[in-house]
Amino acid sequence: MRDLVFVVGLLSMLPFVFGRPHVGVLLWCWTALLVPNFYVFGFASSIPYNLIVAIFTLLVWAFSKEPVRISVNRTTVLLILFGLFGAMSASFAIGNREAAWAEWEKLVKMIIFAVVVSSLMNSRARIEALVYAICLSLGFHGVVEGLKFLASGGGHHIYGPGASIIGDNNHFALAMLCTLPLLFFLYRQTSHRALKLGILGSAAILSFSVVGTFSRGGLIGLLAIGVWSFLHSARKVRFLALLIPLAFAIFSFAPERWFERMDTIATADQDSSFMGRVIAWKQSTLIALDNPVLGGGFQALQNFSVWKLYSLKFAELDFIPTDEPDTLRPHAAHSIYFQVLGDLGFVGLALFVTLGLIAWRNSIVVIRKARRRKEIEWTGQLAQYIQYSLIAYFVAGAALSMAYFELMFVLFAVLASLRQIVDRKDGDQAMVAGMAQ
């Protein structure tokens, strides 16, 4: 029955996309981040919902009155270059090329979506609707799991949906950290009291869900957001008055084994889990040193033959003290930076880092320009909250294999759209001033 209800419900939404491809983008986002296949069984579990919605949206866009115009900016150009470079790397992958091409296909789908977002989501109403779609999808996971954690008295260990990129508890924590700031943006934008309370309650539950993952990276990301928020808060006393009680409530609810897990952060050099990450980082570096331009190809490090090959060269980096690599099975890179380094080499890593730097630069420009114009003040607020998401991603992601996380590509595209909106307003103002002269 659940399968039938879900499929019928989704099909009933598709007619709203006709003539309005931006509505299709919302469904595209929702099906991408919700991972609906995890929540259905039987015939509905094998339906490629996201692919169907994506193709339908692109077809509607092609035949609608909406101009089919790809937004050309530094972000979209870099995203396309990143995708093309990934294809070159997959062509010369040193591991399983079939697996490399499969990962490349996933990346290209994300890039296409991000480019479409930058091209179609170009107004306040559309961008705010997209933020709601993100929060309704990822936030759904956080609220459901957070409530389980609370109902179990802190005993429920949270994991994400199935084999998705956020299925791992650490990855799930990072996804929730990136979603939290977006909820606070929506809280500021609405004047509806019930909706504000619902958003605030969801944000609190998402905070509990981060703790429920027992992720040390999640705690570090949470602290990074807290410190950045405090440093940039105009009302620091009020900020602390709100933050301290929430932090006390969250940590007082956490079980003893959570504190035992977090205590290992101080002795990371003695922790086998962390040192295993360092070993994987060294292996990724060795792959990149041998293949500096194209890297080893997607998932090269997770190919046993590749892992074993570079285990024999491990002594080349023995100036970084670690144990020897595992000889029974390969391991993931456990870092967005070393993941890209091993997959795509130094050139790919440079493209990836540049994407992040341009996103950060766009946020700064938007915030600065929005201060001068009341009508685009919302753009500066959203850019500021996306900065918190970027901080969580680039700090906590340093120990997680989440380089190709769809949400971040979408946020890069949103920042590019915000930059175009404020630049357009500046251009209009300059034109009016010129005509007045």
Image: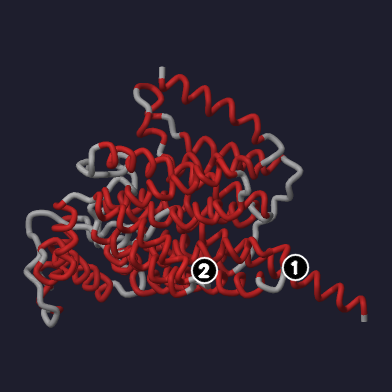
State the image coordinates of residue 333 (x, y, percent, origin top left): 24, 62
Q: Residue at x 44, y 75 (%)?
A: 231
Residue 154 vertical position relative to residue 395 in the rendered view, above or below: above
- Pick the front one: 432 or 164: 432
Residue 437 vertical position relative to residue 116 in the rendered view, above or below: below
Q: CA distance from mark 2 to mark 1?
A: 20 Å
The answer to whether any part of residue 68 appears in the image is yes
What's the image's color scheme? secondary structure
Q: Which residue is mark 1?
A: 425
Q: Nearer the viewer, mark 2 or mark 1?
A: 1
Q: Residue at x 53, y 52 (%)?
A: 112
- Pick the front one: 63 or 404: 404
Callout 1: helix, strand or loop? helix
- Pick the front one: 285 or 12: 12
Residue 198 vertical position relative to residue 178 in the rendered view, above or below: above
The answer to whether any part of residue 97 appears in the image is no
Q: Amino acid at mark 2?
A: Ala
**Mark nearer the N terminus (2 vs 1):** 2
Residue 378 found in image quarter: bottom right
State the image coordinates of residue 67 (x, y, percent, origin top left): 73, 50
Callout 2: helix, strand or loop? helix
Q: Which mark is residue 359?
A: 2
Q: Amino acid at mark 1?
A: Lys
Q: Residue at x 68, y 43 (%)?
A: 62
Looking at the image, the residue that sits furthest to the top is 1
210 lies left or right of 380: left
Whether residues under marks 2 and 1 lie with C-beta atoms below 8 angstroms apart, the answer is no
416 lies left or right of 335: right
Q: Residues within 10 Å of mark 2 (few under 14, many from 20)?
A: many
Residue 111 vertical position relative to residue 9 in the rendered view, above or below: below
State the image coordinates of residue 299 (x, y, percent, origin top left): 28, 57
Quarter of the N terminus within the rendering: top left
